[in-house]
Amino acid sequence: MASFRASNGTELLVHMNGGKGESSYANNSSLQKNLMLKAKHMLEETIMKLDCHFSPNCMKVADLGCSVGPNTLLLISNVVSIVDTACTRLNREPPTFQFYLNDLFENDFNTTFKSLPDFYTKLLQNEGNRSASCFINATPGSFYGRLFPSNSINLFHSSNSLHWLSQDPLLGCKDVASLNKGHCHIVSTSPPEVHKAYLKQYQQDFKLFLKSRSEELVPGGAMILLFLGNQENPRITGWEMISLILNEMFLEGMIEEEKLESFNIPVYEPTVEELRNVIQEEGSFFIQRLEILILPWDDGMSEGSDDIKAELMAKHVRAIMEPLMSTKFGAEVITEVFVRYQKKVVQLMEVEKEKLEFATLMISMTKNA
């Protein structure tokens, strides 16, 4: 995640719902877990290539935008398992591991770290796991800037974070914002100027991200990124749904105009071409593999009726959006938003027969020499 400057100039911190409660991200992130599992082949391939180039005594891995919950430790388990398997095959002693968990300062690191004793126990009990040492630390801060010393990290990983922007893309653009009046994200009726403003912010942010990581990676180091993308097919997004619902509630007099006009969702889903262009312009990385994964909104969720699936989808989105929305709207408004969100999902599935899908861009890169 990234720190976020709102349209009124105040700085907000974007983070997921903490803790282990019913509305927590830890209990509403099965979709994100499924994405990580589907990208494991890319992680394996990248680590094997790293191992061919050099065999560090201490492998340093940073997870950027780690959030909170079991998915944070899933990456660590996967990396340790992959390296351990490779070392066994090559009859080589496994390295010491140093993992850095990065997210914003307001992220709920405590919940993750309270689960470490059990995690370490399972790691040691895992048959065939010969890893002697695994150290885990928190590195709070925005990944849109430097986080680590130069030439210090072997592998960067980021999942479901880089679609978040560093600030409101319409900040300081009152003329453009007025063209999108009543909406807090790009919707089907938004003029091209609004899309251009979001794209410009994405390009600036991602270039800074790439520059910072290239300075921090060791020579030959690698990076794996998973984030929401645009497959260029007309489709409704979860962000557009929230925007339409807030606009609906504003027209009904449930939301003040000033609050709605000062709230924008700082998310941009780039196309493959937009992603490639920024990487080529920045020039620090070589693309090893780039894949697009198209999945239904309910991927990885339990089976059930459309009502049950819609309820789960609403809980997943609420776990992501509630902290940001709470900076502008009260608890009653937020609850009503997601009651309506659930109903609209059911309507789209049952009445309008809408194909609810999202695209994830999965990319593996190595640092240029």
Image (tube, rainbow, N blue to C red):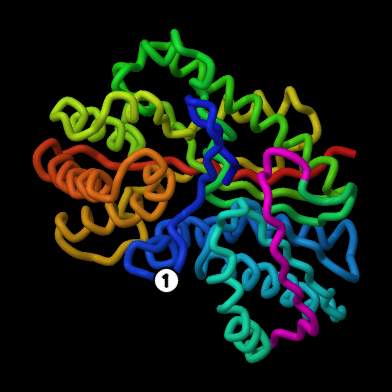
Q: Position of residue 300 (x, y in %)?
A: 36, 61
Which residue shows up at 48% across the image and 25% down it? Answer: 7
Tell me the kind of residue under disc 1.
Lys
- Decide whether the magenta segment is chiefly helix, strand or loop: loop
Which region of the structure is painted magenta? 128-146
Q: Position of residue 2 (x, y in %)?
A: 59, 42
Where residue 344 sits, quadrant-wise, is top left
Which residue shows up at 51% across the image and 18% down it? Answer: 197
Q: Residue under circle 1?
A: 20
Front residue of 218 and 296 = 218
Residue 367 in the magenta stretch? The answer is no
Front residue of 348 and 179 = 179
**Relative to 29, is 133 above or below?**
below
Q: In the figure, is residue 101 to the left or right of 240? A: right
Q: In the figure, is residue 171 to the left or right of 182? A: right
State the quadrant of the C terminus: top right
Q: Position of residue 297 (x, y in %)?
A: 32, 49
Which residue shows up at 51% across the image and 45% down it? Answer: 14
